Amino acid sequence: MDTVTQALLGGAVGYLVAGKKAPRKALLTGAAIAVLPDLDVFISYANDLDKMTLHRSWTHSWLIQTLLAPILALLISYFDKTISWQRWTVLIWLALVTHSALDALTVYGTQLFWPFMPHPASGGSVFIIDPIYSLLLLAGFIGILFWPSIKSRKLMLTVFSLSMVYLGWGLTAQQWVTAQTKTTLIENNINYQHFQVSAAPLNTLLWRIVVVTEDKYYQGFRSVFDGDAPLVLTEYDRGIEALSVLSDSPALTRIEWFTRGLYKVTQTDELMIISDLRMGMEPYYFFRFRVATFDDNEWHLVEPKQVPMFRNSANGLRWVWQRIWHQQVEMKP
């Protein structure tokens, strides 16, 4: 989730833990603690693929956060006795773990149990930026920051509860689309390896579906307003024939683990590119990495380098808005 929203969530959590004793202090400290995990974006990594897959790793680990919380609480309580060490510990721990939990609901991938290495949590039930969720928390944050009172406390409790209901709605809608996707795959005899249902940009009304088989992948969209209309999945070639070149590639192993196999390989005369199918829409994907080049009549593995993506955000968001309400809207690259 975006860092501003994480700060708002941390502020709300901080206030709910210690707001009666020190409302502004609890709010602002919770907000400050909640942004700490995202400071890993300033770490320099060996290559672009490491930068992608090591973001949201140790800084987002519930294990590391649990160990770190009492230490940070000890430091803060040394300078500030207004709130007890025990309450500081709870405040800091919740501000950190809720940050990771919210990130885990997005599609990116969050390593909640680092240094253990299961597949990153990639929920997809909320988009990385969601204005409804953020604005709810912002209303409570502003109320406590500028007018700390009984009414502001009620406002914070109300908007925090509504924000949780909104996240619950996202999970419910996602499961509804997931059930429809499974039915469609069975009806069309598609023997899939894995599929992902994730919220389309800025909303939880339209859902993007990506399915991978051994050699193909499918993309589809489902709005909560589509009714009984059939779910349409469009088939694309996954480029698996190029994998023989990449059999010894650490980059392929890494992206296979990070995406649970939701990737494609694109081959040109001179380049081989792996694309993460979870973020973007056909044919444009945010995370694309050059992993091999053709030279002297053979392919050579190279250090992964992110390939820039063409963007037209205005047209993309316009299409998303239209597709929410109308299933037959044409998607133009």
Image: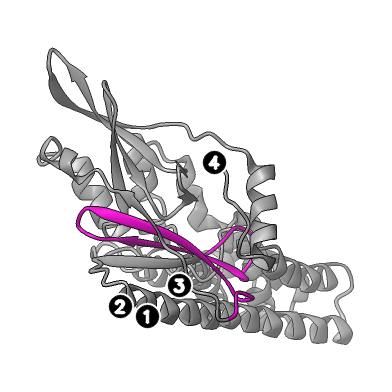
Instruction: Please name the residue shown 85% across and 80% down the image.
Output: 152
Q: Residues within 10 Å of mark 2 (few under 14, many from 20)?
A: few
Name the amino acid, label 3. Answer: Pro
Q: Residues within 10 Å of mark 4 (few under 14, many from 20)?
A: few
Between circles 3 and 4, the one closer to the viewer is 4
Residue 333 circle label: 4
Q: Secondary structure at mark 3?
A: helix
Q: Secondary structure at mark 4?
A: loop
Q: Which residue is mark 3?
A: 70
Q: Which residue is mark 2?
A: 186
User: Distance between the Cα atoms at labels 3 and 4?
Assistant: 51 Å
User: Distance between the Cα atoms at labels 1 and 4?
Assistant: 28 Å
Q: Is residue 91 left or right of residue 293?
A: right
Q: Residues within 10 Å of mark 1 (few under 14, many from 20)?
A: few
Name the amino acid, label 4. Answer: Pro
The image position of residue 229, as x and y in percent, is: 55, 75
Q: Say which label, 3 or 1, has the lower sequence index.
A: 3
Front-lying residue, 223 or 231: 231
Q: Which residue is mark 1?
A: 183
Q: Say which label, 2 or 4, has the lower sequence index.
A: 2
User: Distance between the Cα atoms at labels 3 and 2?
Assistant: 50 Å
Front-lying residue, 307 or 222: 222
Determine contact: label 1, label 4, CB under 8 Å.
Answer: no
Q: Is residue 163 above or below residue 29?
A: below
Q: Is residue 141 visible?
A: yes
Instruction: Specify start and end residues of the magenta stretch as a single range.
Output: 199-227
Q: Is residue 20 visible?
A: no
Q: Quadrant location of the N terminus?
A: bottom right
